[in-house]
Image: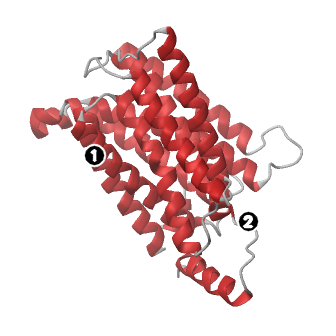
Amino acid sequence: MDKAIAFALLASLCTATSSVCQRLGARDSQPKGVDPWLVFRLARRPIWLAGIGSMILGFVFQVTALHYGALALVQPILALELLFVFGYMAFLGSRTVRRRDWLAAASMSAGLGLFLFAASPSGGRQHAPPSLWLLAGLITLAVVVGGLAVAFGLGRRSPRSAPQRAAILGALTGVSWGFVAAIIKEFSYHLDDGLTGIFTNWSVYALIGAGAASLLLASHALAAGPLAASQPGFTILDPLAASLLGLFLFGEHFEAGTVDLFLEALALALLVAGVSALSHSHLIDGEEDTRPAEERDEGRMIREWPTTGY
């Protein structure tokens, strides 16, 4: 379990780095619909490519963590991604960290720790039956397709605002990442089978397909609007979807006593409150800066330099 926690923390750091780099590379591109070529245009930008490299490294750490620990243990730890994003944006923006930011970070950390303590996720099998995978895949696909219709205003006379679209796409990305995490758990089961066992199993191909779709969703979310809008969906729905899939697919279980359930509910409330407050911090959402003009201009140059592309 200690190895699973350590590798999950490393994965969280890499994922946060990826989110910040991809947002810096994509924030001047706001597609009005699903654009399959968005990724190829963004690939011309070094900062965006750096984010992809960090995402791949995070994937390696995540696979390793899931090899040693339960899905319901590893994925909630990845919610710490937002704390790392918070730190990055404080550094890039050269802004003062306010008391409410520290309180939000403390709330999030306390909520995560309390949840893992109370739930004590454990048990389960390494391999899920095909019938359950088919059902889980169909439900996830239906959620994503329905969400895309809502995000891009199908049936609406007026298009949704950029923050609204980013929030919806961020939520869909979180659900998609949760499903990808479940596939990674299945994939990790076959790592000891050698190359033949890996490439003759469906999970590696499902991982490539679902991973590519999730990357496209994340790119749209990060390009659609401010990081404050998309990040809560990334941070909250990813571990939530993954934990539910861990229960459904792999038979993992949480402690369900009366006291345990109360503490788990309290922990989730603290976690959601912390994520919501941090995601709307001036460090992330661009709240008006009160520093002198010279300092603001210097900070703006730091933040905007990576987005110039070619």
| Side (left or right) of 219 relative to 71 | right
Q: Nearer the viewer, residue 272 or 310?
A: 272
- Taking the view exactly as shown, the residue that stands out farthest to the bottom is 294
User: Compared to 295, does 66 lie above or below?
Assistant: above
Residue 141 appearing in the image: no
| Side (left or right) of 96 relative to 15 | right
- Using the numbered discs, state the Cα–Cα distance from disc 1 to disc 2 in whole angstroms: 34 Å
Mark identifier at residue 287:
2
Q: Nearer the viewer, residue 54 or 297?
A: 297
- Helix, strand or loop status at disc 2: loop
Circles 1 and 2: CB atoms closer than 8 Å: no
Q: Nearer the viewer, residue 1 or 140?
A: 1
Residue drawn at the location 59% of the way across and 35% of the way down: 270
- Identity of the amino acid at label 1? Phe
| Side (left or right) of 23 relative to 10 | right
Question: Residue 238: horizontal and vertical position, in percent?
Answer: 50, 37
- The residue tagged 1 is 7
Question: Residue 84: horizontal and vertical position, in percent?
Answer: 47, 57
Residue 120 appearing in the image: yes
Residue drawn at the location 46% of the way across and 56% of the way down: 16
Task: Give the quadrant of residue 35.
Answer: bottom right
Question: Residue 236: horizontal and vertical position, in percent?
Answer: 55, 38
Task: Give the quadrant of residue 148.
Answer: top right
Residue drawn at the location 38% of the way across and 56% of the way down: 14
Q: How many marks?
A: 2
- Identity of the amino acid at label 2? Glu
Task: Give the quadrant of residue 108.
Answer: top right
Tell me if mark 1 has few (under 14), some (14-19) or many (20+) residues whose alpha carbon lies within 10 angstroms of its own: many
Q: Nearer the viewer, residue 188 or 66?
A: 66
> Which quarter of the rendered picture does the N terminus lie within?
top left
Question: Residue 80: horizontal and vertical position, in percent?
Answer: 46, 47
